[in-house]
Structures are given as C-alpha cells and as structure tokens.
Amino acid sequence: MLPWERLRDKILTLEGKPFQAYQALDGEYRFERFALYVDRVIVEPPGVPSPLRVRIDQAEARFPPSLWASRPAKIALEDFIARRWLDAIRKSARARGGRPQFAIDVGGQQILERTACRIAEDYVEIRCAIYLPAEGRKIASKAAQTVFFEDLPQLVDGALIYPNLNPNAVQRHVEATEDAEALRLQLSSRGLVAFLAEGAVLPRESGSDRPLLSHLVPLAAPPELTVTLDLPHRGAVSGMGIPRGVTVIMGSPFSGRSTLLRAIAAGVYPHLPGDGREHCATVADAVLVRAEEGRRVEGVNVSAFLTAHPSGEDLSRCRTEHAGDVVSQAAGIAEALEAGCSVLLIDEDTSAPGLLARDPLWRQLAPEVKQPVNPLAEIARPLFEEHGVSTVVVTGHSSEFAAGADTVVAMDGFRPRAMTAEVRQAAHVAGPGAGPKSSFGGVHHRVPLPDGFAAIHIPERTGSARCSWAVTRWTSPRSNSSSIPRRHGPSPSR
C-alpha cells in the first residue's frame, strides 16, 4: 500500500493530460486515518464514475459491537452508515456550489443488505464511486487534489467516525429493523400473514415511496382485526392483523384499497424510522403478482387456471414468446408457487379481468358453454385448503371473491372496516368456502437446462443484430409434479 503522498504526486503530473491518463491512479493508498482503494478508473464512456473503496479501522471508527450484534442490526447499521455517507456528499456539494463528485447507491425507504457498506470486527468499508474532475477531455489536477485531499477526509469524518454521528439516530435505525424482524417472526405463530400497526401512514407520494404527508391518514385498526404483538424495543404494539386464508379488500376507487395492498406487499422489508410503515410486517415469502402482457413464458404449468389454450399447447408446460394478460398472470402465479410463496397478493387494477372472476350473469345465461379459464375466485379457496397458500386480493367490482372469503376488509377514505359478517349475510353465504367449488391440483417442479444459457443473436426491429443471453429453458420432472415445493431459501419477492 502506497502512502497518500504518492497519490498526490501522481495527480500533480497529470495536469492537462488526456482523461485516459487517470488510469495511473489505480492502486491502494494509506491516508492518516483511512485507506483508499482505487479499484479501476473508467475512462470510456466519458462521464461514468469510477469505483473506489474507503476502509477505516475500527480502532478509529469506534462503532460499538453491541450495535451490530445480530444480523438485522448489522444490516441496519451498514444501511445507516451508507446513508450518512450520502448526506455528507450532498453537504460537501452544497458547500462547493457544484455537483457532487462522489456517488453511492443507498436505495429507497427500505433497509436492505447492500454492498455499499461493510462492517466487520476490525474495519468499516464504504464502496462508492467518484467523478474524476476534468475540463473537457483534459485532466484538472487541482480540482482532483481538492476532491481527494479535502472532500474525501470530510466524508470520512462525517460518516465513518461513530463519535461524530448522532447516537440516538443510529440506535433508532437499528431498533426499527430489529422490531420489524421480530414482528415478522411472530406472524406465523399468530395465524397471520401481515400486520399493520395502529397509526401507520400508508399513503405514498405520486411516483415515489415516501410518505404522503399532505394526506396524513393514520391507520385505525378495526376492532375485529385488532391484535397486539410484543417487540423487543417498542414493547407491546397493537394494529390490524391479516389472518391466513382468503382475504378480500373492497372499496371504490381512491378509497385506499390498493394503498393497503401495497403496504402489505412492502411489509416483507423493514423500513426507515419515520417512513410510516416501520411497524408493518408481512411474511417474507409473500409475492405481489400482476398481469405482464407480452412477457415470455417457458415451461410453466398453468393447467390450474386454464382448461384450454388457443394454440392447443400442453398447459402443463406452457410456452409462449408473447403471453396475453391472462396467460402472463397465470404463469406469474404458478412461478410464485414454484418458488415456495405462502401468500399471493393480487390487485384488480393490475390484473387480467378474465383471470380473477367469472361474470355470474354470463354463467346463468350460458351455463353449458365451456369455460377456458378457471378464475382465481374459484380456486383461491382450494389453493389454501390443499396447499396452505393464502390470497389477499383487492377488488371493487366482483362479489365472487367476497362470497367465499375468510376475511373482508372494506376501505373508505383510507380507513379499514371489517365487513366479513355483513358480506356473508348480504350474499346469503353460510361461511368460508361456500362459494364456487373447484380443485387446484399440483404444481410442477422445474429445473433450468444447461443449454438454456447459451449466447445467441437476436435481431432487433431495425434489422440489425445484437448479442444477448437466451432466456433460460426449463424442464419439469414428472416425478415431482404433484406437490408444491416447500418454502426454503430467500423470499421470491426480494
């Protein structure tokens, strides 16, 4: 490892040289308080930042080991440090009156394990990128010296030295993550698939995941669905529990029904303190499935949803280059089940109408007509009874789901109400599962074929050719086609 003076001398000799000469900076340099690793200077295409790493010894950083004693706490602390690094970058840019010279990816409102920061017993490391100063295509060495020897040490002081941070903010970040994980671990034992704390703020800004503070409607849990869970830091917390089985969220447009479902879908991740959803949690393997018209489908078993395919293909191994809305969503659900999900999340607004429910009037007018689609409203109950997979669906027009649902939640002005009993009485249904009867069947296990990863040339619409990777080809072992794979490994929604 070279002393920092060698980096300074290299930069001084580069004044006015072509931008490609910056490649001479590759290497490792020891500063007074930290080590700098310039892994690779990117010179083409112009304007692309180059990756670098900054590592500081724990003896200098002084982060208490108790802050990252558990895995969730370690992920939270790394997330916090990366976000403080970004704050320091913005502060430095404002002070200089120019654009930030450094960049780092810290994600959005979720607290997730990322490569931007790593903390260990003996060091803390930041992995970011730098825009090397230039005037046109010529190196500006004086500006580069300012970036490396003034701005970079300020970033280290502002983000990597624990005594310089707000200890209360660090603690809140870690505790919010540990509480979210504790919530998630309690769901199954309480017969729940999701939990949303009393007072949670669910509405989001348009085109963003940040809380919509101008429309602040704290969540008020219906008494029938209120449960209380114990958290290691916050203690007892009450909120709305979504039980296992078939749950229907009803309401008119703009009532908050889709907002509630999106909050449930986002509950597979812990969120930042102040996000409004810090104490909302969903089982880790919940999957939000939508129609994706035009997607490719390869060897997926959609026989539970379709009785006939327009092309006459084998429905147990459906393959198409451009799937329609019904086939695409049926394939998405089948793939989620293959991955081992235990909860399906469906929003009517982003789904294929023909897959969700069958028009009861058409069923009466033409009962003898063969139906090519088995709607989800008829097989959601068998899916739960045969395989233990719950379904949470948002609907505003179909009573087919509500008729056989275990739980019905009505949204009105972003306020939920439990209406299971009222819906059953209005629909003259005796109880769960009294709706249309069907059977789901099995789910194939698929494995990728080795030759599905070969590079091929795919012609573009303009007639030119480009090199791309072939979409993976799959095969479905017949011996394992009668059961759903058990839920092991990471969540498919992650």
Image (cartoon, helix red, strand yellow):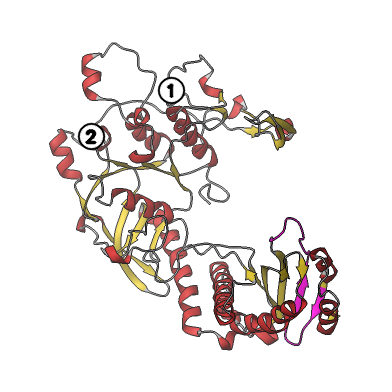
Residue 122 visible in the displayed image:
no
Dot 1 or dot 2, earlier in sequence: 1
The secondary structure making up most of the magenta span is: loop
Q: In the depicted view, which residue is nearer to us: 464 or 176?
A: 464
CA separation in Å, label 1 and label 2: 21 Å
Tell me where residue 460 appears, x and y as whole percent: 65, 31
Q: Which mark is residue 399?
A: 2
User: Which residue is at a point 41% across and 55% down the rendered structure image?
Assistant: 207
User: Which residue is at a point 25% across and 13% down the rendered structure image?
Assistant: 366
Tell me where residue 241 appears, x and y as whole percent: 31, 56
Q: Residue pushed farthest top? A: 368
Counting labels gives 2
Q: Is 347 one of the magenta-colored residues? A: no
Horizontal relation, residue 399 to residue 308: left or right? left
Part of the protein shown in magenta? 28-47
Residue 440 visible in the displayed image:
yes
Q: Secondary structure at mark 2?
A: helix
Other residues around mark 2 within 10 Å, as few (<14) / some (14–19) / many (≥20): some
Q: Amino acid at mark 1?
A: Leu
- Quadrant housing the N terminus: bottom right
Which residue, given by chain and number where applicable, does mark 1 sit on?
Answer: 306
Q: In the depicted view, which residue is nearer to us: 332 or 296?
A: 296
Tell me where residue 490 appears, x and y as whole percent: 56, 51
In the figure, residue 299 lies in which quadrant?
Answer: top right
Q: Is 44 one of the magenta-colored residues? A: yes
Q: Amino acid at mark 2?
A: Ser
Horizontal relation, residue 424 to residue 375: left or right? left
In the figure, residue 137 lies in which quadrant?
Answer: bottom right
User: Which residue is at a point 26% across and 35% down the rendered structure image?
Assistant: 404
Tell me where residue 172 appears, x and y as whole percent: 45, 77
